[in-house]
Structure formats: structure tokens, C-alpha cells
Image (tube, helix red, strand yellow):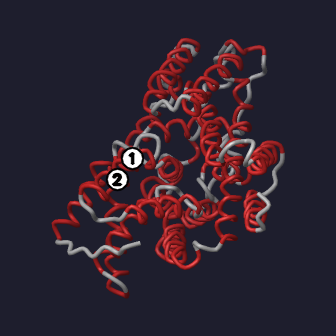
Amino acid sequence: MAGARGGGHAALPLESPCSASMHYPTPSPSSPTPQNAAAAVPNHLPPSPETRPVPRSLSELFWSFTWLALQGFGGVLAVVQRELVEKKRWMTNEEFVEDWAVAQILPGPNVVNLSIMIGDRHFGLRGALVAIAGMLALPLLVVLALAMAYASFSSLPAVAGALRGMGAVAAGLVAGMGCKLAAPLVRHPLGPWVCGVIALAAFAAMALLRVPLAWILLVIGGAACVLTWRRLEAPRP
Amino acid sequence: MTPLTLHLQPADWLHLFVYYLSLSLLAVGGAISTAPDMHRHLVGQQGWLTDPQFSASIAIAQAAPGPNVLFIALLGWNVGLNAGGAGAAGWAWGMLGVLLCMAGIMLPSSLLTWAATRWAHRNRQRRAVRAFKQGMAPLVVGLMLATGWVLASAHGSLAHDWRLWCLTAVSMLLVWRTRLHLLWLLGAGAVLGALGWV
């Protein structure tokens, strides 16, 4: 940890070429042609890359990820959205959803994949490593401490009850974040109704039918990507 | 639980590491999706962990803050404890187990993610890359709602555990509609649970 902190300041002048200035994969908002079927809705412009906040150092990256990991009971996903999108504003809701989709489809722990993507974007390989370390180092110590405490306290009914209560809240957190992330879909190339059907299909397949995730990503995700591809215009030369 | 006493050779530790290396790229949708295979291998085939150790590891990692992948660290920790016995030796072997398991499960998938997302970022103006990222967005919303649903389903029936379901619904509304800090919600859940009200 001390290494990550110390490294932060040395890193500043060397900020990697893939820093925040080339951050958003935006379909060039200056284009005069309507981009999609929802053209009647004014096109949402993400905050311009020059004005948006970015992590200033590796140590800020490390402690940001440590802090959000330590808040993440029952999964870190909900906290990532709250901290990085709403509080720190390092990314927009749209970017979060897109990055999350990529992190989800690649093998490996999703939040770790997301940390790699965000860290790499701002500070290159070192950023990715620092972000992983932030996400895992302190939480690992906490988990080990809990495992040692577990043996002595697991029989107390209050402890079991507290875990039950926190589990119920954690379920609500994830679902509430899902509702929140649905809002940007009104500006999606496919339009809100098609998006709603896709989201509902994914929910039903996963929650009610218990289809393996790989199949959901392949079939529903593949169909959604093809439909979106047809709605997007070809890239300008 | 009946403690296991293992005599692990260096080859066994290598085996543990390689096993997690091989599992890493299969963990699509999170490490937890490969948990059944870990149970088959570590508890059934190798006999390095007991059943209660395996279940407790997952339960503790779910309840603790941080990424759920840390349950793999706990599995490695317990293998180490079983090999090293009590005291400092057990802790040292436990840390070795943690390091081997976590490095094994993380290395291949992290390298792939790093390389793939770099490529996608360089080519982010390509129509295919944009279509992929934007096309997956509605799916992500559906999957998040499904995750909430699956977690809530642990509650039991609506008739019996209606207070837990209410707690989940209320926290969902609060997260969606307010900017209340998430730790307040979790703390409230812990207090309500500890008092036996839910």
C-alpha cells in the first residue's frame, strides 16, 4: 500500500497516452445527421472531456477503489455506480453501463475487470494494477479477519440476524441501481421500448428461468448487438 | 467440524495454482459461477477442504465488504490451515494458499481483460465496437434486476418472510429515488436484523 501511495506522485508527469482526454467513445455529437430512431429526443451530450474530473494520482485511484470496495457489502456493483458516477463523476451513467457490459462478458470477477478498465484508461498498466490492488488488498484483510471471528461468533442469533438484514438490503441496492441505470436507455439507439423488452427478457431468463449466463449473453446479447449495429450509422471516414 | 490434517507437497501447491489458472478463463459472469466446480475438485476429488469450510467461505465472503471473488481467497486460506495446523505455521501456509488461489484465478482473466479493453478503446469509433457496447446496455439493466431478485429469493416465501421482502423493496426505492448513503441503508438492515425485527 505504501508503494502505491508513493508511486502516485512519481506517476503524475508520465500520465499514459490513454488518459482521460480520449475517454468517451462518443459518436461525435457534432454530427448534423440524426443518429438513431430516438432522434426526436435531444441528443444527450456527456460532459466534455476537458471539464470532467479525473483521478489525479495513483494514490487517489488506490484509495477510491479501496473505499468503494469496503462499502460493498454483498457485491460492489451498486457502490461503483454511486461513487464513480454520482460522486466523483469520473464517468457518466452511459459509460458505466457500457463498461460494465464489457466487464461482464469477459471472464473473471466483474468488478475487478471494471477496475482494470478504469485504472488502465487513466494511468495505463500501473493504473490497472493499482486499481486491482485497491479493490482487493484491504477487503482481503477484512475477509480474513471475519473468517477468524466467524468461528467464535457464528452461533449468536444477533449476528445471524444482522447478516440476514444486510443481505435483504444488499438485494435492494442492486435492484435499485438497475432501475437507476434504466434512465439513460431512453436515448439508446434502439429506443426505450425495444430496450425494455431486451431488459425484461434478460431478467426473465436469468431470474425466473435460471438460464446459464453464457447463453443469455450469447443469444439475447447477440441479438441486441446486431439490432444496435443496424441502427448505428457507418463510421465517418 | 472435524479438522482436516493434510500433508501437502510442493507439487500439490503447484496443482492448486494450476487448477485456478485453468478455471480463470471459464469464469464468465463472475467467479461465483465456477464455485460448483471448485466444490467438486477441492472437497470431492482432492479432499483438501471439508464441506462446512467450503460453505462458510462463500457465506463469509458474501457478507463481507469487497468483491465476492474473495471467497476464493478464503478457500485457499482454509486449505493452508488444513495443511499447516494451528498457530503461526497455519497462518503462513494460509497466506500461501490465499496468494496461489487468487493469483491463479486472476492472472489469465485480468490479462485478457487488459488486452481486450485496450484494443476496444483504440477502436472505439468502429461501428462494431459501439454496437457491442451500446447493445449490451439494456441487457445489463435486466441482469442487475435479476441479481437483486436472486439475492432476495434467499429470503423464503413472501407469506413467511414478508418483512425481509419489504426491507428489500424499501431499500430498492431509496437507492433509486434518493442519494442516501448506502452505508446508512446497510447499517439499518444490520440493526433491524440484529434486533430480530426482520
Image quarter of the C terminus of chain B: bottom right
Front residue of A26/B12: it is B12
Mark 2, residues whose alpha carbon is within 10 Å: few (<14), some, or many (≥20)? some
What is the chain identity of the residue bearing mark 1?
A: B
- In percent of width and height, residue A233 lies at 56, 14
Q: Which residue is mark 2?
A: B38
Front residue of B28/B153: it is B153
What residue appears at the point 80 percent right and 61 percent down from the top-left corner? B197
Q: Are marks 1 and 2 in contact (CB under 8 Å)?
A: yes
- At label 2, which amino acid type do we have? Met
- At label 1, which amino acid type do we have? Thr
Q: Which residue is mark 1?
A: B34
- In percent of width and height, residue A99 lies at 55, 39
- In percent of width and height, residue A143 lies at 52, 69
Residue A173 in the image: above or below residue B54? above
Mark 1, residues whose alpha carbon is within 10 Å: few (<14), some, or many (≥20)? some
Side of A56 relative to B1 (left or right): right
Front residue of A17/B130: it is B130
